[in-house]
Amino acid sequence: MSQYFYSHLVPLDEAVALLDARQLTDEEKEDLINLIHSIFHHRILDHILKNTPKSEHARIIKMISADPSDFGIIVHVKTLSPDIDLQLQDLGKSIYYEVSLLLNR
């Protein structure tokens, strides 16, 4: 699985592991994994952009585009929003809960 600058803060792997209990084809599982990754990624990026100055958005997006696994991204974002790591941990837990509810319907 891909690693992102926020991977250590959110339960992305745990959310994907919820699929293991399901009887899915490889294609269905791959589609759902991509969907889970997309949900986490977009919600996290949205949160970061809402909690940082607009003047920094282009730089943040450029850093993410260049190397989404670069830990320097979260270091930079923390200089702009010091408790962003705690916020992302909470957001990650919330997203995990939402995904688990959807998968257990």
Image: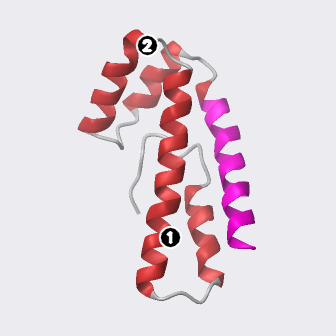
Give SS at disc 2: helix
The residue carrying pointer 1 sits among few (fewer than 14), some (14 to 19) or many (20 or more) residues within 10 Å by Cα, namely some
The residue carrying pointer 2 sits among few (fewer than 14), some (14 to 19) or many (20 or more) residues within 10 Å by Cα, namely few
| Location of residue 80 in the rendering, given as x and y in whole percent from the top left corner | 50, 14
Task: Report the disc number at residue 54.
Answer: 2
Residue ID for mark 1:
32
> Relative to residue 74, is residue 18 depicted above or below?
below
Nearest to the observer: residue 57 or residue 20: 57
> Relative to residue 96, is residue 51 depicted above or below?
above
State the residue at coordinates (66%, 40%). 91
Q: Quadrant of residue 19?
A: bottom right
Looking at the figure, which quarter contains the N terminus? bottom left
Q: How far is mark 2 from mark 1, CA to CA?
A: 32 Å
Nearest to the observer: residue 11 or residue 28: 28
Looking at the rendered structure, the kind of residue marked 1 is Leu
Q: Could you tell which of marks 2 and 1 lies nearer the N-terminus?
A: 1
State the residue at coordinates (53%, 39%). 44
Magenta residues, as a range?
A: 85-105
> Relative to residue 63, is residue 33 depicted above or below?
below
